[in-house]
Amino acid sequence: MTLADLGDARRCERLVLKVGSALLVDDRGARRAWLAALVAEIAAARARGQQVIVVSSGAIALGARKLGLEKGGRGSLADAQAAAAVGQIALSGLWAELLEAHGLTAAQLLLTLEDLEDRRRYLNATATLGRLLDAGAVPVINENDSVATQEIRFGDNDRLAARVAQAARAGAVVLLSDVDGLYDRHPAEPGAKRLPLVRTITPEVRAMASPVSGSGMGSGGMISKLQAAEIAQLAGIALAIGNGHVEAPLARIAAGEGTLFLARRRAAARKAWLGGRLRLKGEIVVDAGAAAALGKGSSLLARGIVRVSGDFQRGDAVAIRDGAGQTLAHGLIEYDAGECTRLLGRHSSEHADILGYAPRSAIVHRDQLVLL
Ligand code: GLU
């Protein structure tokens, strides 16, 4: 996949387009003319045979203006939730009106993190998106900020867009931002160079990301964009970052002005969903022997576990990390937290004596495990 393929309906039949707050809203309110131009590009993509799903930020910023809240509505969670409730009406109205001008029907979906972390609700979202696209609508999605609680929310639409792309089985995600892509250092620093292509997100690549969003308006920043790219890569989906502050931003990205994160091998759909989980119920720290065995495709056995934390039940998703804190895998666990602690370091043949029963010899079976 290349940046040019993003505009090619045969190479990328389904595209998720994320639009950040700083593009949609300025001091005077919604940037209507800018959005109308972007919608014209979306309509052109549709005419080429591409299906487009929009993930739109801007509700908090718009609502905060209407309510007169300070700090763009991000001073407190209560402010953000109130602002989102007000701003979302205006935001979806605007999208609907501008899409309608091209004969396109908008469909609003407000999702919470849990809607995509719970397997059944995730599959439900998949079905709804598929039906909407087949019926010719343009889904316009945002986080349901007014009800999402502090601990369990995306908080940024970058990762939401990647999870939506996974649910929709999209070919690519485009994150429209206020920068041209990922730079090898802060873009304001002299000599900073844009990376046109990233194959793997290594620690060096991560170190290039500046932690704050340039505009101060959205909550994205480059770190959440890299996290989104990791989720997409694992799901076999390419992700591009490009500048929205230009005329015809999609055409400019397709002309090569952006950063493309290539898709990795496509993990099976269920494993990709598990790998992209953002909230995990517990953490299992393993020794070097177990880490090596996992890398070769083995199940996780109690013998190689050195520490267990979290309050999880059998069937919950947990992170498996090495001693240095690096996440090796996500998996669905076969025992609850108390049982894992009792089995830690012990051989599988001892499980029955320790617990009085031994339903599984592995703590996480390899079929329920995805390497990251
Ligand atoms: N969901 C937020 C909004 O609509 C934006 C989150 C973000 O900045 O990425 O305002």
Image (cartoon, rainbow, N blue to C red):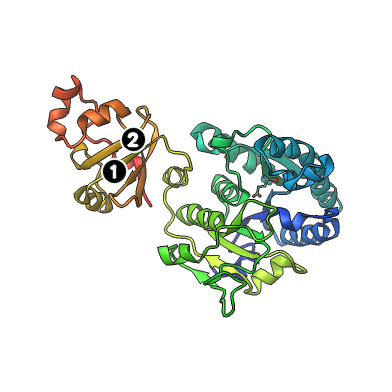
Q: Is residue 199 left or right of residue 167?
A: left
Q: Is residue 91 above or below residue 115?
A: below
Mark sitting earlier along the chain (1/2): 1
Can I make out residue 291 in this image?
Answer: yes
Q: Residue at x 34, y 50 (%)?
A: 325
- Camera-nearest residue between 273 and 50: 273
Q: Residue at x 24, y 36 (%)?
A: 362
Q: Quadrant of residue 354?
A: top left
Q: Is residue 115 above or below residue 181?
A: above
Element type at marker 1? strand
Residue at numbered disc 1? 285
Q: Position of residue 197 (x, y in %)?
A: 52, 71
* Circle on res. 309: 2
Q: Residue furthest top?
A: 356
Q: Quadrant of residue 135?
A: top right
Q: Amino acid at mark 2?
A: Ser
Q: Position of residue 47 (x, y in %)?
A: 75, 60
Contact? badges 1 and 2 (CB < 8 Å): yes
Q: Residue at x 29, y 26 (%)?
A: 338
Q: Position of residue 169 (x, y in %)?
A: 55, 49
